[in-house]
Amino acid sequence: MTTVYIDSETTVNETISLLFSKHFIEESNSNLFTLYKVERQNGNCIEMSVDDYPLILRILAGPFENDILFYLMEHGKSQTVSLEVSNYLVLPESMLRAFIDKFSYEEIEHIHTIKRKYLAYKQLLLRQFEIAISQS
């Protein structure tokens, strides 16, 4: 998460320029991006106009810092974000990667458990077939 300090007269374009300069990104690409306002309660993701003032919108949202968040994304990439997903947007990538690794490990373990049960059931059926064949 990156923080930039702006005043009430800073527009979306100026905010994007500040973000780009903070991360040493060429501003020639700035027209490909815009700020999106994400409302945490309902997951609405709204593309902001170049003339909007992010600080004014932030103040109008109320006193709670996490009620709305602003994200820099490509133009036209907006989609509704559920509350569950919006909670993960603020986590560092390393933590998200750890979640993925944990879920992958659990999935593999679940697959192995199912395979073991299948093999045990298969062996039981084969024994039952052998017993049935030997008795007839």
Image (cartoon, helix red, strand yellow):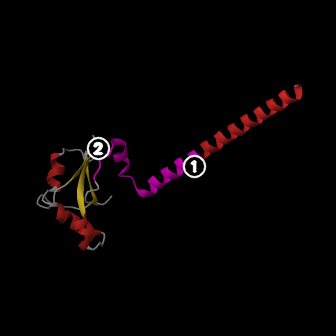
Q: Which residues are magenta?
A: 78-107
Residue 101 is one of the magenta-drawn residues: yes
Residue 18 visible, this angle? no
In the structure shown, which secondary structural element does the residue marked by tag 2 occupy?
loop
Say whether disc 1 or disc 2 marks the residue closer to the N-terminus.
Answer: 2
Q: Is residue 8 left or right of residue 84?
A: left
Q: Which mark is residue 41?
A: none
**Dot 2, how many residues are within 10 Å of its Cα: few (below 14), some (14-19), or many (20+)?**
some
| Spatial separation of the CA atoms under disc 1 and disc 2 | 29 Å
Q: Is residue 107 left or right of residue 86?
A: right
Q: Amino acid at mark 2?
A: Gly
Pick the residue in front: 10 or 32: 32
The image position of residue 2, as x and y in percent, is 30, 60
Q: Could you tell me which residue is drawn at 12 percent across and 57 percent down?
A: 8
Quadrant of the snapshot with the C terminus = top right
Residue located farthest toward the top when viewing the structure as drawn: 136
Residue ID for mark 1: 105
Residue ID for mark 2: 43
Residue 65 is one of the magenta-drawn residues: no
Main secondary-structure element of the magenta-colored stretch: helix
Residue 74 visible, this angle? yes
